[in-house]
Amino acid sequence: MPQPTFARRSPQTSSVAFLAVTADTLVAADFRPRIRRRPPGPYRRLLATPGARAFTIGNLMARLPMGMFSVSAVVMIAGTRGSYALAGAVTATGLAATALVAPWTARLVDRYGQARIAVPATLIAALGSLALLLCVRYGAPVWTLFAAYAATATTPNTGGMARARWNHLLKGDADALHTANSFEQAADELCFMLGPVLAAFLCTALFPQAGTLVGVVLLVSGMLLFAAQRSTEPPAARPRPTAKAPLRAPGIPPLLVVCLAMGGVFGAMEVVTIAFADAQGHRAAAGVVLGLQAAGSCAAGLLYGAMKPAGPAAHRLPWCVAAMTALLTLPLLAASLTGSLPLLALTLLIAGMSTAPTMVTTMTMVQQRTPEGRLNEGMTLAVTGLLGGIACGSAVGGWTVEHTSAAAAYGIPVTAAAVALMLTLLPPRRVRVAG
């Protein structure tokens, strides 16, 4: 005698569960799909923080032009005035002005709040870029180019302000803050990888001023969106009369010297790579080759942020710098022994993977050692150290290329990294870690 069989449709899904009776046994077969819910990854949890996505989008929009303005200025000035020397001098003036003005802007941001200071400072910088555009377009005297580009020095440290927001939102959660710092470093690398490419495309495909014009629009609109997110903004903090300035805080000056040496790595690498590609007859490929280095750093930064850091940042930094020093020997060997541009590009991709972990660890130490209420100023001082090192590295790298060869000049980044390594190995003074 056949046994009865029943079918039951689940109210939550269209699948069917079958029930059958055999003798005295009830057999159930459920064909509903089994969904295994994985816990969200560290970056998904990070961006799930209330308000995080909105301020991140605005910050990335405002940060992308940081990789566009210098390239746009060089193409615009050299294309209309016919002088790369003038273009380089104008951009160097802007770099020097930024190194002087940025810490003061960051101090005002800490004291009066991000929205209150960053928006007017950004508008002043945008007017400086537009003034440069008009001066170049209508053939104004040379001195006006220097004055206009120097005005862009009021541009706030957008990456520092984003890190300050994460530090405010994730206070007390060291693992989440490590992920946030890694995310921001990867964003830096992404912007400096895409920015020059976008600027070069706009200036050549449209008109010489297009890169600067688009950069201004992105900077202002991104900063307005970022500043509008008041719920995630750190509260303004007036420093106590007895509080030390970040430049005098214990442990900060040695870190700034390390940043200076690491900036020498980046500055020399850029100049030497352009010279090497030019010597091989492929100067146009230099941007792609440098972009691969940034891509390696971006990927490594995201991977580093997904990992749980082992030990305090002060113990990790020498290992990160040692890895950077070791990996930087690969481009030197590729350029000196083979002279192959594709092989050099591969070694730069690998060497770039050491950049983000080193910078993430350095910025973590800066956050830990900066006095409370002055975080933007402390991180901007670190960026200023990097800018100074970039300027020195560019000059030394260019001199070495002129007097030896581009291949031999790859020894300059290795030397700068070795100096940074020796500085991290110096006996540390007793440092109070903030909060």
Image: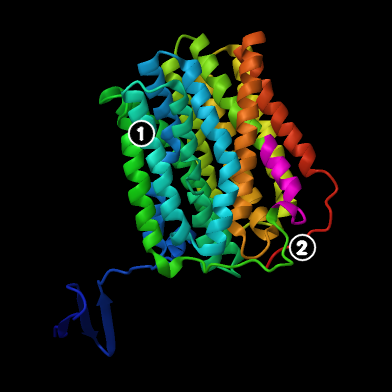
Q: Position of residue 104 (x, y in %)?
A: 58, 50
Q: Is residue 185 magenta?
A: no
Identify the residue position indicated by label 1 in the image: 212
- Which comes sooner in the sequence, label 2 or label 1? 1
Which residue type does callout 2 highlight?
Arg
Near-viewer residue (270 or 63): 63
* Residue placed under numbered mark 2 in the picture: 432
Q: Quadrant of the N terminus?
A: bottom left
Is residue 208 positioned above or below 156 on the image? Answer: above
**How many discs appear?**
2
Q: Does 321 appear above or below 362?
A: above
Q: Amino acid at mark 1?
A: Thr
Q: Pinpoint residue 105: horizontal percent, then vertical percent.
A: 54, 51
Up/down of 415 relative to 240, above or below: above
Furthest residue in direction bottom, as rendered = 24
Above or below — where is 329 with respect to 225?
above
Is 310 on the left-hand or right-hand side of 339? Answer: right
Residue 256 is one of the magenta-drawn residues: yes
Q: Can I make out residue 213 in this image?
A: yes
The structure residue drawn at horizontal position 33% and vertical position 50%, both measured from the top left corner, is: 221
Magenta range: 247-261
In this rendered view, identify the residue nearer to me: 210 or 276. 210
User: Which labelled disc corresponds to residue 349?
Assistant: none
Secondary structure type for disc 1: helix
